[in-house]
Image (spheres, helix red, strand yellow):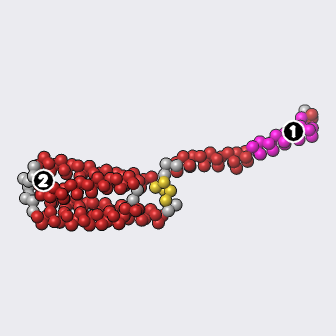
Amino acid sequence: MIAFLSPSFLEIASLAILAALGFIIWLIKVSIPQIVEKKLSSVLGRADLVHRVQFETEFRGYTDTWGGAINTYRAFINAFPHPHFAPKTEEKYEEFVNAHKKFLDLFEGNRPFLPIDILSRIMVFDNLMVDAKTRSMDIESPEAIKANRKAVDEALKAFSEAIRERVSKLQIV
């Protein structure tokens, strides 16, 4: 039993303990941060990093453009009502044209700050509004009005979903 307490055994045991401690310290300093970094980069890799100022500018562009689109949509609905419920009037049509002009001003003013996928969704909505303006008061049949409104509703929905998707992917730094 005294042989187990010899200096050579104690030296070997202390070296083993030091080696184990060294390995643990290495894990803490090197390996664990690498694992955490890989996990974070995989999570952040799916996100777009933007500065707070850029985010605020981009978000203001979304809210301004969305507000203009909704006002244009309301004017569109009033300008092209269902024939059984309300007659079309030149006054309502002019309100629609003016609302669309205001929307275009907002849209063009915010264009540099909006991502391409959102711009494409806005363009679909805008094209439908231009189409309604060029056809002016010619939309008569309830079926045509219903189809037109459905297309505009889908364009607005795609626009709002694109905004939601973009904002959900942003990481503000």
- Residue at x-position 36% and y-position 54%: 118
The x and y percentages for residue 27 are 70, 45
Q: Nearer the viewer, residue 5 or 74?
A: 74
Would you call the spot at circle 2 few (<14 residues within 10 Å), some (14-19), or many (20 or more)? some
Q: Nearer the viewer, mark 2 or mark 1?
A: 2
**First to last magenta residue range:** 4-23
Would you call the spot at circle 1 few (<14 residues within 10 Å), some (14-19), or many (20 or more)? few
* Residue behind mark 1: 12
- Residue at x-position 26% and y-position 49%: 154
The x and y percentages for residue 145 are 14, 51
Q: Is residue 49 left or right of residue 34?
A: left
Residue 64 seen in this snapshot: no
Question: Magenta region, mostly helix, strand or loop?
Answer: helix
- Is residue 90 placed above or below 120 in the rendered structure? below
* Residue behind mark 2: 139
Is residue 6 within the magenta segment? yes
Q: Nearer the viewer, residue 20 or 65?
A: 65
